[in-house]
Structure formats: C-alpha cells, structure tokens
Amino acid sequence: LAACVRAWGVAASLVAGLAAAAPRVMAMATPESRTSSSALLGDRRLTDELVQKASELVGASELTFEAPVVTQYTEGQRFLAHNDASLQPELDWADTGGQRLVTMIHYLNDVPQGGRTVFNNLKGEDGLPLAVVPKAGRVLVFLPATADGKVDERTMHQAEEAVDVKFVCQMWKRQRTVPPPLGVT
C-alpha cells in the first residue's frame, strides 16, 4: 500500500465554487495539534458532483462518504501527525459508519511555500519522508485502514505549517453508511 497523488479532473466550476466558499469557513474548536479552520459542506447542491466522482473512483456507495469538509490554513497554521483511522473504530465511530477506509484531500489552490502533506512513515524516491505539495486540482488519495478496519500506521501524516494560505476539501469513505448530519444523505 502506498500513498498516491492523483491528478483528478474535478470540474472547474466545482473547484471555483469551493474556493470561493472557503474564506467563509467557520472556526472549529480544535486541540493544539490542529490550528486550521474548517466547515462541513452539508449542502448537496455544492457536493453532489464531488461525492459522485469520489464514489466512482473507489467503487463505493455515495452513502458511505462523510460530507466534504473545507479547511483553510493561514500563515503558521498546521495539523500535527495523525492518522485518519481510529484504533477503536467500533467504540469511537460505531454510529457514524465505522472505520475510515479512504481519505481524499482535494487541493483547492497552489501553495508555493509550506503546507505540504507529509507522510513520515513512507519514504519518497529520495529516501526522505513522502511529501505532497498542494497544487490546485490535485487529489491525494490514500487508505488509512485496511478493508477489515485495521489502522495502517504508514499513512500517519501531517499538514506542515502554512507559509502561504492553503485551502483543501477533505473527504472520507467509511465501512458503512454514514448517517446525517455527518453523511451526505
């Protein structure tokens, strides 16, 4: 299993719409490990096409996806090393669709400095930790857990401290149907 970067032709109008909405994200109360601002995109008019493409890409029902989340990182903001899967998914997430099996990070703008997504447990061709530079229209897809729900520690990752503003749209596919308001139903 390796993290992969996949250029994906997300419709220009969708990306433009998400980028336009991103500055209006509401701040979430977050621990010190995460200093960005995020907003859940619960309006299907904004997300239908994106969720459909994600569903087709991984061959799964749209109902197994969490609603997309737009996140803004301004200068100095970051998200320390974490895994998108839970060590105890049936305890933590039994009522919200179970384990996260697929993560998709849609980069909404080019970020010339800072803000890379870094996988310290995966090495790039240069032998250094695998690092993905945010580029508008690029989608990073990886599997934080196996199909049976076991965490894959290789996918522990972090969002480096932003120098330039960074906008992403994150999506997660779960084991089972994700109920509202977290799900896209």
Image (cartoon, rainbow, N blue to C red):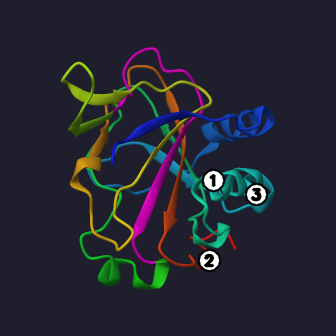
Q: Residue furthest top?
A: 112
Query: In this view of the protein, can residue 140 be seen by the observer?
Result: yes
| Numbered tag placed on residue 48 in the rendering | 3
Magenta run includes residue 45: no
The percent coordinates of residue 95 (x first, y second) are: 46, 85
Q: Callout 2: helix, strand or loop?
A: loop
Q: Residue at x 58, y 26 (%)?
A: 109
Between residue 133 and residue 37, name the one nearer to us: 133
Please tell me whether residue 69 is drawn above or below residue 13 in the rendered image. Answer: below
Reading the chain from its start, which is encountered first: label 2 or label 3? 3
Specify the quadrant of the image occupied by residue 28: bottom left
Q: In this view, does 62 lie to the left or right of 92?
A: right
Classify residue 145 as left or right of residue 170: left
Disc 1 marks which amino acid?
Ala
Numbered mark located on residue 54 in the image = 1
The residue stretch that appears in magenta: 98-117
Q: Residue 63: where, in percent of width, then height?
A: 64, 72
Of the residues shown, which amino acid type is indicated by label 3? Asp
Relative to 54, residue 181 above or below: below
Identify the residue position indicated by label 2 in the image: 180
